[in-house]
Amino acid sequence: MNTVFSPLNKNNVPPHGILLDYGIEFTNVPVFNGTLSGSTYTNPTVLKQIYNILLCSRIRNVSTGFVIPTTFNTNLKTNRAANIITLSCLWFKYATFIENPLGSNKLTYSNNKFYDKYINGVWQNPSRERQTFALAATKKIYKDYNVKSKTALQYFLFKYAKYYTNYLNQF
């Protein structure tokens, strides 16, 4: 990917420096846009996948909101508490190429490389900004939690184990 994207001016990618097209997407990150649907079910595994996709989609060296993957995994395991469902949250801005950036005359592709497109000296933005939001319990299964019981509310004291974001000062 470094070779294919090397001619692009990485500073043109919005301030967060994440271009989803640059990374390897093994989970559909765009569906996690804050709107609930049948395809936005999350668990710790999905949360890790989204995090790792965003991490490998950094087209330039940005660290806001990120820790190394082993720290991310450790935080999911160590921030749990007895009788409390602990949650971890991701909320990131990122960019994707617009649909058909080559045909829209926003980007050029030659010799297996992408190049910025300028018309009359004006850079043509081939991307659009998006956001992803995902929230999951830090464990897949909580044994002996009966949500139908009258005492269920005691189990729904939520605690954030950790949140990760490149939205500074938003939480």
Image: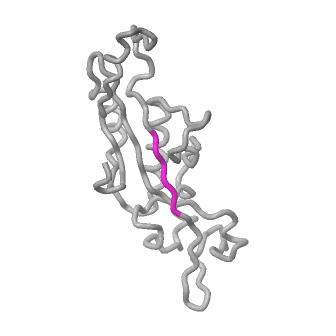
Q: Nearer the viewer, residue 19 or 68?
A: 19
17 sits to left or right of 117 = left
On-image quarter of the N terminus: bottom right
Q: From the top left corner, tell me how far across and down residue 77 is, in percent.
A: 32, 26
Task: Name the residue at 52% across, 47% down.
Answer: 33
Task: Name the residue at 57% across, 41% down.
Answer: 27
Q: Quadrant of residue 120?
A: bottom right
Q: From the top left corner, tell me how far across and down residue 89 is, in percent.
A: 38, 39
Task: Name the residue at 45% across, 36% down.
Answer: 47
Applied colour scheme = one colour
Judged by its main secondary structure, the magenta piece is strand
Residue 4 versus residue 24 in the image, above or below: below
40 sits to left or right of 45 = right
Q: Quadrant of residue 163?
A: top left
Q: Quadrant of residue 150?
A: top left
Magenta stretch in the rendered image = 129-134
67 sits to left or right of 94 = left
Residue 162 versus residue 43 in the image, above or below: below
Q: Nearer the viewer, residue 4 or 75?
A: 75
Q: From the top left corner, tell me how far across and down residue 103 is, in percent.
A: 73, 72
Q: What is the tally of numbered marks visible in this picture? A: 0
Outermost front residue? 150
Task: Name the residue at 29% across, 16% down.
Answer: 83
Residue 133 is a magenta residue: yes
